[in-house]
Every structure is written in C-alpha cells, then in structure tokens.
Image (cartoon, grey):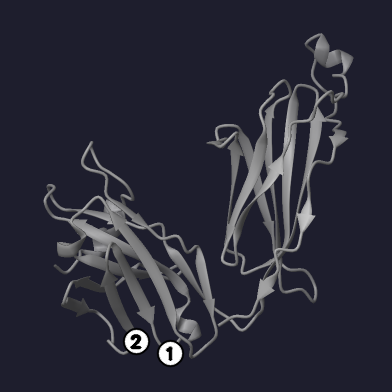
Amino acid sequence: MDPPNSCLWYFFLPFFVDGAAQVQLTQDQLSITRKPTKTGRIDCKVSGINFRDAYIHWYRHRPGEAPEWILYFKTQTEKSNFDKEKFSVDKTTEKSTLTVNKLTYNDMATYYCAYWDQDLNYGIKYFGSGTKLMISSKFLKMFSKHTSTLGIYYALSYMCLIEDFYPNVIKVTWEEENKNAEKNGVHEEIWPPGDNQQSYSLSSWLTVDKNSNKNYRCKYEHEIKGDYVPMESPVGAEYPPAPANQLFGGPSQSTAWGQVGGIGGGSGAGGEEVE
C-alpha cells in the first residue's frame, strides 16, 4: 500500500475520472493557526467510496519541496513514514482527522488527504483541496469588508474589499443570484502588511455587461468565518459616454472611470486568539 511519491502529481484528481463513480475528498478548513508546542487537527470528509474499507493517506507539502507521504490508515491498520508521537490519525464515519502534535515552525505546510483507488488501471489517487497549517502567536482577525460599483462605457465592475485579516489564507468567489459568476471577468489582488501592521487586505473585481440586471454578491471564506457581501445591481445609473473616436471606430485615448455609486459595506467580523 505504500504510495508512489514520485508520481504524486500525475495522479492529482480531486473528483472523478472517465465517468467513474464520483469520489470526493473535502477539506473545509482553508487554514488552521496554532501556537508553537500546541496540537493541530485537520479534517477530511470522504464520499463516493466504501469508507470503512478504504485506505486514507495523508501528505505534507512545503513550498519549494516535493510532497511527503506521512501515513495511511484503514480502521485498525496504520502505517507511518514519521514518528507516531508526531502524527496520528482517527477515522470516524466518513471523516479522517490528522493530528499533528508538539507543533514547531517546521510543521508549517499544506496537508492533503488522499484515497488510492487500485481498482482502476495503474491506480488513481484522489486528493482533497488541502489545509494550510500556520504556526503563529498572532491574533486571528477579520475586521472589515466593503463593496462599491464602478461604470465604464459598456461595462460594470463590482469591487469587494476585505481588509485587516490574518492569516493571509482566504478564498473569495462571486455569485450571480446563487450561481457561480466566475465565467465573467474576475481580477483579485492581495496586499501584504505595511509598516507596523500584522494583517492583510484583498480586493476582488467582477466585470459584467452594463445591461446586466442580475444581483451579484461576493462570498469569502476565512479561518475565522465565512460570509457574503451582498451587492445589488444599480438602478437608473448613468455611465460616462464613450469618447467620440471610440464611437466612430477610432482607438480610445483614455480609460476614464465614472463612479456609479457605493453599494453595501460593513465591518467587524471580529477576531480571536490563536489556540
């Protein structure tokens, strides 16, 4: 059952292959942050297989290094590539939990659960999305979020600004009336802390046709919490006219943005102390 480490990323398939039954490994924790010497626990939910008889593997991936296999577990059977006092695993109904004990900064990495399906030719390994383990004594926080809307000629751009959060592991997506809106133009940028700061900020832009009458909202997921930032489509908004040379087919000399109006906003998701 020892996995082929050298072939790891050739078999990185998170969901399904060639119409086979859907195997899904879900790691809901984007990140977990713990103080040195403490204990970190990472969960992995599994569906689409006979979980009771399945071998669930765990890997560790540090930036710039090859992934390392840690261990696998099946009911009462466990095999580890590391000291068992460092890593242990529990397997309950459809969930595997990796425990990392006596944390040090050397344990900072992204941890992946995996399932090796040997019934398919050559064996296929399915992976979870990964959970980043952060070792820090900093105060976890997620304080403010704002939204605004800008218009330019034939397009409308929504901006979602999330400020003053730590750690810097965050996921932002856009929804169009409860459906994924990522097919539209999305641009995202995260800013590192400035002088005397210990937190991050992020802006995400969604660009759609100005005639769109859909309602959009920005969704974020963070270690502290996940939430929505509702954004209603502006009604009766006036847009800056296109330059004459653009109307008659000539090249545009400038890109002048016009403020349509601020929509939504908020603050205060709060913070919490690292365990």
Apparent side of residue 106 relative to residue 19 in the rendered image (left or right) = right
**Which circle marks residue 194 in the picture?**
none
- SS at badge 2: loop
Depth check: 243 or 190 in front? 190
Q: Residue at x 31, y 65 (%)?
A: 95
User: What's the mark number on residue 102?
Assistant: 1
Quadrant of the rendered structure where residue 222 is? bottom right
Residue 50: percent from the left, percent from the top? 18, 56
Assess whether mark 1 and mark 2 are in contact (beta carbons under 8 angstroms): yes
Give the residue type that dot 2 points to: Lys
Q: Looking at the figure, which quarter contains the C terminus?
A: bottom right
Residue 162 to residue 239: above or below? below
Viewed as shown, does residue 40 lie left or right of 157? Answer: left
Which residue is at the front of the view, 67 or 76?
A: 76
Q: Nearer the viewer, residue 162 or 2?
A: 162
Which of the 4 image quarters holds residue 178?
A: top right
The crowd level at tag 1 (other Cα within 10 Å; few <14, some 14-19, many 20+) is: some
| SS at badge 1 | loop
Q: Is residue 10 above or below residue 143?
A: above
- What residue is shown at x 29% (from left), y 75% (from top)? 90
The residue sitting at 19% across, 77% down in the picture is 78
Q: What is the quadrant of residue 112 in the picture?
A: bottom left
Residue type at numbered disc 1: Lys
Is 234 placed left or right of 20 in the picture?
A: right
Tell me the quadrant of the picture where the N terminus can be found.
Answer: bottom left
Q: Position of residue 111 (x, y in %)?
A: 40, 68
Q: Which numbered disc, 2 or 1, marks the residue that appears first in the sequence?
A: 2
The percent coordinates of residue 232 (x first, y second) are: 73, 35
* Pointer 2 residue: 86
Q: Give how far apart the Cα atoms at labels 2 and 1 are.
A: 7 Å
